[in-house]
């Protein structure tokens, strides 16, 4: 009996040691969100419980539900993410992944994961980063600087409208933002699957947020893995805010942008050339 | 003790790089032709009606698809031929490689460069393009380049065959091939290629075609000889 007890003690000691070693190996990945530290080893069972059904046990987007889902779940083995605060071609920050999980993806099967605690979500972020070696060889990008929003004026909206024409946003998003531009029907993502541009007329939240700052960030970082490129090379911050002001006018929402635009249009509509080939200027 | 000291000294000299590099040895050449058997797909005219500028520019002679470009004598163009094993005497690529977007086409259709070699991407068209290299080992990015925008200066760190597309013009497709070896060539219109400056040794020569995959052959080079190597792909129409 005595020896048996001793054996048990040794065995359990070993198993603790083994568990610790396992935890260290998997937990080499950590996530830091504010004051929270997420641990991959803790995130693993949470992932199996809440995420693997779609994203797959191996993070390869081949979970049992994936075949029924469109758009498809994110493939974590590629380490390519849409919603980032960092420039195109760079890894997102831990906070970006945390925010994406918290916010969910509107118009997709990815819900808001608010029922999970902040700590749970931080642990999941750490575990998601174990699926690609890029998290070991590359560092996340530096978040882009977003200056304070410029004042909303009819001039800023009109300048933004000129940019919507000049930057050719309408080629995909359509002349009136209805996602019906000439290139909309042929868009594919990085897995060659069809993908739709955002339809401003739905007034729904954006894929990566809902505020004016989120909108600024979306077109300045691009949504990696999708046809939406980064415009950071060719838009100055002031121009980017102008574009934000115009984009808002295309959403059927009660926003200051829409109010100002409608009031102005009432007496000036005839002054605008329609957006499209050879158009757009006032 | 003394022997040990000499051994250490010798090791230091070798590993410390104090030993002068050997004088350039005789170098050979591998040259040949890439051809196909079977039936390749037909090059189809591309409808660019969605981009009136480009449709007008090519009105007289529509641009043809370039995924398989057959030439005289069953030859294949745009095949990358390179040393895939046994490579020696390679140097780092330093010259700037240029990619143009012109008339809604990528020029060249296939370009080869080495890790960290500068790559400049130009938009010569009077409208926007977005450049979207679908890299997997390297970071995938996607940037808008409106008319008149400055060139994009970039590079790739890792060897990879990277397909590139423009999402606005879905017919625009090209390849950026990153190779660690400097012994490479892209076949000409008549399917010919030449890899020169190869020190004596055993090599594997590989030909890569975007639709048909790869074909390899082992070649031994001695002295300054030129070895003829012909690589043949089995073509299928789809």
Image: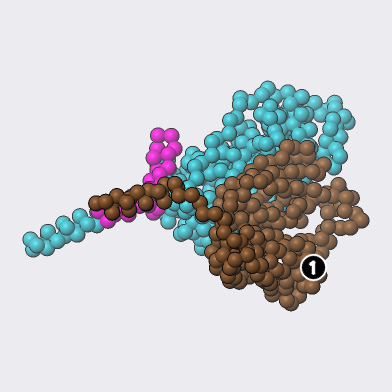
The quarter of the rendered structure image containing the N terminus of chain A is bottom left
Q: Is residue B80 visible?
A: no
Q: Which image quadrant is residue A19 in?
A: bottom left
Within 10 angstroms of label 1, few (less than 14), some, or many (20 or more) residues?
Answer: some
Element on which disc 1 rests: strand
Q: Is residue A228 above or below residue B160?
A: above
> x%, y% of residue A197?
69, 47
Q: Quadrant of the C terminus of chain A?
A: top right
Front one among B12 and B174: B12
Image-based side of B1 in relation to A84, left or right: left
Chain shown in brown? B
Q: Is residue A31 magenta?
A: yes
**Residue that mark 1 sits on:** B71
Q: Is residue A229 rendered to the left or right of residue A99?
A: right
Residue B116 appears in the picture as rendered? yes
Residue A233 percent across, percent down from the top left: 67, 36
User: In front here: A210 or A226?
Assistant: A226
Q: Vertically, is B69 above or below A267?
A: below
The shade of chain A is cyan
Q: Per the image, is B238 magenta? A: no
Residue drawn at (56%, 65%), measured in percent from left and top?
B200
Q: Is residue A148 left or right of residue A202?
A: left
Task: Return the chain for callout 1.
Answer: B
Q: Which residues are magenta?
A: A17-45
């Amino acid at each position: 009996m005595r020896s048996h007890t001793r054996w048990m003690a040794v065995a359990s000691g070993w198993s603790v040691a083994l568990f610790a070693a396992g935890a260290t190996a998997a937990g080499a990945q950590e996530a830091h969100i504010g004051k929270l530290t997420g641990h991959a080893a803790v995130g693993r069972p949470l992932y199996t419980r809440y995420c693997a059904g779609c994203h797959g046990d191996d993070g390869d987007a081949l979970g049992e539900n994936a075949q029924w889902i469109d758009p498809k779940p994110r493939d974590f083995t590629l380490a390519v993410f849409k919603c980032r605060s960092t420039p195109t071609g760079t890894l997102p920050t831990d906070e970006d992944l945390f925010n994406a999980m918290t916010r969910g993806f509107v118009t997709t099967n990815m819900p808001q994961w608010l029922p999970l605690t902040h700590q749970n979500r931080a642990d999941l972020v750490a575990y998601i980063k174990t699926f690609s070696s890029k998290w070991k060889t590359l560092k996340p990008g530096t978040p882009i600087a977003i200056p304070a929003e410029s004042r909303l004026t009819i001039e800023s909206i009109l300048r933004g409208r000129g940019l919507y024409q000049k930057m050719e946003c309408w080629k995909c998003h359509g002349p009136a933002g209805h996602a019906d531009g000439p290139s909309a029907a042929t868009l594919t993502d990085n897995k060659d699957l069809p993908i739709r541009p955002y339809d401003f007329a739905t007034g729904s939240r954006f894929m990566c947020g809902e505020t004016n700052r989120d909108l600024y960030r979306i077109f300045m970082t691009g949504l990696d893995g999708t046809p939406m490129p980064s415009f950071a090379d060719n838009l100055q911050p002031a121009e980017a805010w102008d574009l934000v002001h115009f984009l808002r006018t295309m959403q059927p929402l009660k926003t200051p942008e829409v109010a100002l635009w409608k009031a102005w249009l009432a007496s000036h509509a005839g002054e605008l050339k329609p957006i499209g080939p050879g158009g757009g200027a006032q | 003790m003394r022997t040990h000291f000499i051994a250490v000294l010798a090791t230091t000299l070798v590993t410390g790089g104090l030993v002068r590099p050997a004088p350039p040895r005789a170098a050979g050449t591998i040259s040949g032709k890439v051809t196909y058997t079977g039936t390749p797909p037909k090059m189809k005219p591309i409808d660019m009606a969605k981009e009136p500028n480009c449709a007008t520019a090519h009105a007289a002679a529509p641009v043809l698809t370039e995924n398989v470009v057959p030439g005289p004598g069953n030859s294949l163009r745009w095949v990358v031929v390179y040393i895939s094993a046994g490579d020696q005497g390679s140097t780092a690529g330093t010259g700037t490689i240029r990619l143009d977007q012109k008339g809604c086409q990528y020029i060249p259709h296939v370009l080869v460069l080495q890790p960290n070699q500068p790559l400049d991407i130009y938009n010569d068209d009077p409208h926007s393009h977005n450049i979207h290299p679908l890299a997997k080992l390297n970071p995938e990015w996607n940037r808008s380049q409106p008319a008149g925008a400055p060139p994009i200066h970039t590079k790739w760190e890792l060897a990879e065959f990277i397909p590139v597309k423009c999402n606005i013009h879905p017919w625009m497709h090209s390849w950026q091939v990153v190779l660690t070896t400097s012994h490479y060539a892209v076949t000409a219109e008549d399917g010919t290629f030449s890899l020169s400056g190869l020190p004596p040794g055993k090599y594997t020569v590989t030909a890569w075609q975007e639709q048909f995959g790869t074909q390899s052959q082992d070649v031994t080079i001695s002295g300054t000889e030129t070895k003829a190597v012909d690589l043949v792909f089995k073509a299928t129409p789809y």
